[in-house]
Amino acid sequence: MTEIKYFPFYACFCSVDGEVTMFSLSELAPLDQHQSRSKLLKPWWEIFMDYTVVLMLMTSVLASTVQLSRDKVVCIPLDSHASANLSAVSSNSVATRMPARIPPDIGPNLYLTASGRRTHLVHQQYVYISQVCYHETLPWSSRFFPYVALLLSLMLMASGSFWLHFPHTSARIEHFLTILAKCCESPWTSQALTHAAQQDILQDRNLLAKAKGAECAPPCSSPLQGLTRHLRVESAAYRPLTECPPPCQSRHSFDTASNRIFSSSVHFTPSGAHHARQGISLDKSDEEEARALFERVRKFRAHSESSDVIYKVYLAQTVFKLLTATLIMSSTIPLLSSFSFTHICHPEVQASVGYAAFQCIHVLSSLLHKLMLAYLTLLGLYNLLNLYTLGWLVHNSLRHYPVHSLKELTSLRDMPDLRNDLAFLLHMLDQYDPLLVQRLAVFLSPVSERGLLDRGVEGPWGEQKLRAMISSDPDGRACLQLIALPELPPALFTLSHLQVLKLELITDARFTMQVSDMTSLRELHLCCCTASVESSALRVLQERLEVLHITFSHTSEIPSWVLSLDSLRELHLFGHLGHSWPLGSLRYLRHLCVLVIHGMLQRIPGELCEVAGSLVKLEVHNEGARLLALSGLKRMVALTELQLQGCLLERLPSALQALTNLQVLDMKNNRLRALEELPRMAHLTRLSCLRLSGNSVGTLPDSVGELQGLELLDLSNNQLQNVPLALFSLCRLQKLLLAGNLLKKLPAEVKALQHLTELDISGNRLESLPPELFISCVKLYLLNVSHNALRSLPVGISSLTELCMLDLRENNLYELPAELGRCSGLRGGGLLVDYGLFLTLPPHVRDSLSHICSSSSSESDLEESLRFSPSQWRFSSALESQI
């Protein structure tokens, strides 16, 4: 057999520079996908209107083309007497042009006199008169109507699909069509519709049997007719009946036979409470896709039912098209009489040609008149279709889709009525093909979803699989994460050694009494979950749960039982709290030590003082929202760590003076400009860590020297041009981060920081380093001077015997000192420098340093020799962090 091979077609384009671009024509297919899918939302009248507009456009194009190529007028003078002067001039000119008189003896009749009326005009004058009369005598409709009709046709064509491309509707429609395509392709759709059809037939038979009682059962043809009706809905996975009960059969035997026929399939009862588990099996991937599709349909429904913008835009588009077409017809019909074949022209050119009036004929008047009649006929049909559309919109409640509209399958009528845009889209889809609505209804039905969930939870999520999914978190604890499950697997409660449980997108996370078997559970994460707890399980969680993370989109998703967890020590809230969830309710958590809020707070409520006795750490990440009231901090005297990040604060809160036990203060990413309140913090003797990076601090006051307990000071990513000498009086300072500022010089007084182990001055404008830095700060462990303007390194760097990481990238260095080889801590990847600069070292020094670990321009395998991975570095370049 000869093998037939198919080769794709290719299209070639040649650019201006002669380069040929070739691509497959199949790559152009996605360009038409949106248009083909949008046809599903176009009823029959929309299709007719589209074709009508196309015919109108073709008519106007034909008229415009003919008028551009053949349109003209032909004129002749009507005056019988010309002016005297022009007659004399014309006679003389004619006499000069006539041949000389022929002698009589040559021939009697050789010269013949011309017959007709002499006009005394030449061809150029006729052309001139015709052009003048064309513009002055012809009505504007004869000259411009084809072009106006072309523009109007284009406008009607654009307005016909405006609702599909409007910014506020196109995204929602595209999302709806994508979901519809997924619903039609899902194997669960075919199975659910088949089971629903089987259940409907079974119900019909039972009703018929009840009606007849002990009489004969219906003949076999009647159930087959019902089956045929349902097979039209979905027959891909359905096996038709091959047996039917005998003509005379009791009700009991008939029901028994019916149950025997359908016992091998999953079916939905009218109440939706029972689902058989022995159905047609689905692949694991198919079940996961179906569950994800249920969640996607649920979110789209909530979004589309919140407004009716699609309905309003479609209604406005219909009214606009109707008014536009009516206005065009009312202004165009009177113009039909203006198309005339003969016209009388009176141009003001008598002084030039000698005639005052001309009779002209319009060559295309008859053709344009007929094309205009055809255009108006099509426009009238277009207007009637718009009237029908408007009547359909007004007389039908299109913002409400009742469940009884699903006439074929009664088993899918358990879903609530739909409203607004989703209801309107389903009405439009009904006009195209009602079967598509039934396929989408499968994923709107709670009974259908429950049937899928019951299949998915049991079996695949057994104890063995859950144990295989357990991993270790950074602290070495046993951790399990479950995502997008319908409910908690029963085998979950058998994991007695599980310490951290993370639940995300769980539809029904219900904790039962079996949670008591999870004896090691201490930490729980709830991300967009609907979690409920039985009373018996709540007592167990109250005794054991210590850490709780809740991620929510609305405060109503925060479970109420959270406030009764007596043993809870850490609470992390991720979401917009607003005013609907009072933080004062946390007073019931008597042992709460750590409170982390990632939201948009406007104030620190004073009610938190009721848990101030136990609260030692408070974190507020306000995500760029202004935090206005901070007076509630005054009563939290037990706080040892306070983080106020992204709160748009412009000054240090005055309430900090009352926090005498404060050890860590983090106010990154605010709008601090001046630190005038810094002297008031001098009595905070326990303050050891101060982070003020990501602000707009331009000047550091001398009072910073009063914070003698500081061990870490982070002022990176500010606008500092210099640092006060008082800074170097902080004798306990171990980490100084000044990256991303405007420093031009590092004072020599830095030698006073003899306990300094980490110094980051990257991303500044330094041209040199003081030699005292290398002589006195011998405990330096990490030094980052990248992204500066250093021209050389001072002598004495070899005295930094504990230096393990030195970053010299992006400077103006031309060579490196050979004494770097004596820094034993830099060996094995501790030196970060450009590859070309590294080659300036002597060979024996390069060998001692073993490998370089820098420069994107070096070989890729050099990064493998890094001694410090990015996760081990305690700071990074400020400029790199900004990028």
Image: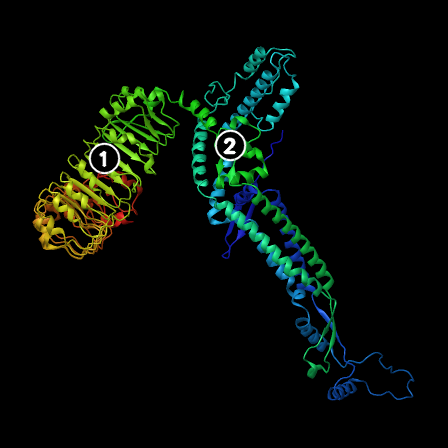
Closest to the camera, between mark 1 and mark 2, is 1
Residue 243 in the image: above or below residue 750: above
Tell me what residue is drawn at x 70 percent, y 73 percent: 130
Looking at the picture, how far across and down is residue 199, in whole percent? 54, 22
Looking at the rendering, which quadrant does residue 511 occupy? Answer: top left
Tell me what residue is drawn at x 67 percent, y 57 percent: 62
Looking at the picture, how far across and down is residue 505, in whole percent? 37, 32
The type of residue carrying mark 2 is Ala
Looking at the picture, how far across and down is residue 681, in whole percent? 11, 48
Mark drawn on residue 586: 1
Mark drawn on residue 209: none
Mark 1, Cα crowd under 10 Å, few <14 / some 14-19 / many 20+, is some
Residue 136 in the image: above or below residue 242: below
The type of residue carrying mark 1 is Leu
Residue 266 appears left or right of 462: right
Q: Earlier in the sequence, mark 1 or mark 2?
A: 2
Looking at the rendered image, the quarter that the N terminus falls into is top right
* Circle 1: element type: helix
Tell me what residue is drawn at x 57 percent, y 13 percent: 257
Can the viewer see residue 570 in this picture? yes
Please name the residue that numbered disc 2 is placed on.
441
Residue 312 appears left or right of 765: right
* Circle 2: element type: helix
